[in-house]
Every structure is written in C-alpha cells, then in structure tokens.
Image: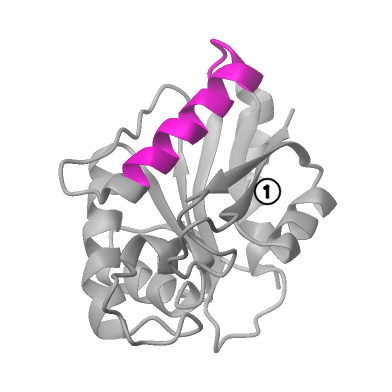
Amino acid sequence: MPPRVNITSDIRAISNLFALAFRDSAPTVYVLRACDSTWPVSSIPLSLLGPKMIEWTTYKQSRGGELVEADNFAAAAIWFPPGADLPASANDDERLVEYRAMAGKAKKEYLGDRKYWYLNMIARHPERKDPGVIRALFEPYIARAKEDGVPIWLEAVTEHSKQVYEHLGFRTVATLRMGPGKASPDGELQDGGEGIPIYAMILE
C-alpha cells in the first residue's frame, strides 16, 4: 500500500519531526550556535531547537507554505507554490538573513523571472523506517509543477540528500557556501572557515 500523504495544520507535530531530523544538520547548527555554546555539533539540544522550529514553521505557514506529511508523520515537507515569497522574518538571525539573500541571488540567476515550486524542507522521522515516504512527498508536487509548466527549486544540505534528489531527476546548478569565513563544514563557528556547502538544485 503506498504511503498516505496529507496536508496538515499540525505545526507542533511537523516541527517536532523536523527538530528530531535536523539536530545534526550543519546549517541549523550554524544558525543556532553561539560563541559560548558547549553542546556538540552532532546534537543540538531539543530544548533549543524545538521552540525555534515551531517559530520557523509557523512563519513559513503564514507565508503560504504547504505543510505536508506522509504516513502519520513518518516524513514531512514544506512546499511553497509558485508566486509565494519567503523573505527573512524580523526574528531571523543575521546568519539566516545572509543565507536567504545568497539563495535569492542564485534563484534569480538560474530561474530569472520564472515562477517555480520551492521545496523548503523535507525530512524523515529518524525513528521511522516506512518505505517510500520521501518519494511520496515529492510525486504530487512534481506532477503539479508539470501541470503548471514551472520548475522546482530546492537546496540540498548534505551530499546524501543531493544524491536522493538526483535520483528523482534534479540537477545541481550551483554550490552555495553558508557562513564562508565564519563556519566549518559541520556548522561550528570558525574564523576563516570554508563554510557549509549547500547544493542549489532544479527539476524542469
């Protein structure tokens, strides 16, 4: 039986899934890291990440993001339809503001004035092994993008996720660097660090 995919308004449940899935995500580590942080970069404290993820998800929903889950939150995603905009919020850390500006320039370079579907976040619950749930969160939106005659844009935050998206037909158009001169590739604050590689990808 194929995974069941549903639009959801349960911000707490989807934020909890994302918090568990992105505890070791280098971009998330970098945004939340402080000079006096003592927690390991491989495990952001849920007491810190949980409330932040609720804040971020609430804001994204308010900007038109579709919150979608598969098989009762075995996996989840946030999709933005063509024409929706995700500017930095007043509460965003300057590191996130800088990254969004950089990603915006890349979108302008590779998409021009075309409208597009944007996959903002996608993740599997780390304790769930349900097969096919990531693909199930892509397929309806790939179909909708084809119907709309527009591309899909996403930013892969790991080499593994880039390979997953390549398998679905995406191609990498640019490698962005989050926090160049300020962070190491794992998200730790580091003067002169090479930054965190993030892969801008398109399906068209």
In which quarter of the view is residue 49 placed? bottom left
Up-down relation of residue 105 to residue 120 (above or below): above
- Residue at the spot 54% in from the left edge and 10% down from the top edge: 113
The spot of residue 171 in percent (x, y) is 79, 39
> Would residue 118 be found to the left or right of residue 134 on screen?
left
Q: Nearer the viewer, residue 50 or 43?
A: 43
Residues 66 and 43: in front is 43
Question: x, y percentage for residue 70?
Answer: 53, 67
Where does the image place residue 150, in percent across and percent down from the top left? Answer: 63, 22
Q: For residue 140, what is the image quadrant?
A: top right
Above or below: residue 14 compared with residue 145: below
Residue 9 point in image, percent of width and height: 28, 58
Quadrant where the image shows the C terminus: top right
> Residue 104 magenta-drawn?
yes
Residue depicted at 69% across the width and 27% down the height? 146
In the image, what residue occupies the spot 59% across and 42% down? 154
Q: Which residue is mark 1?
A: 139
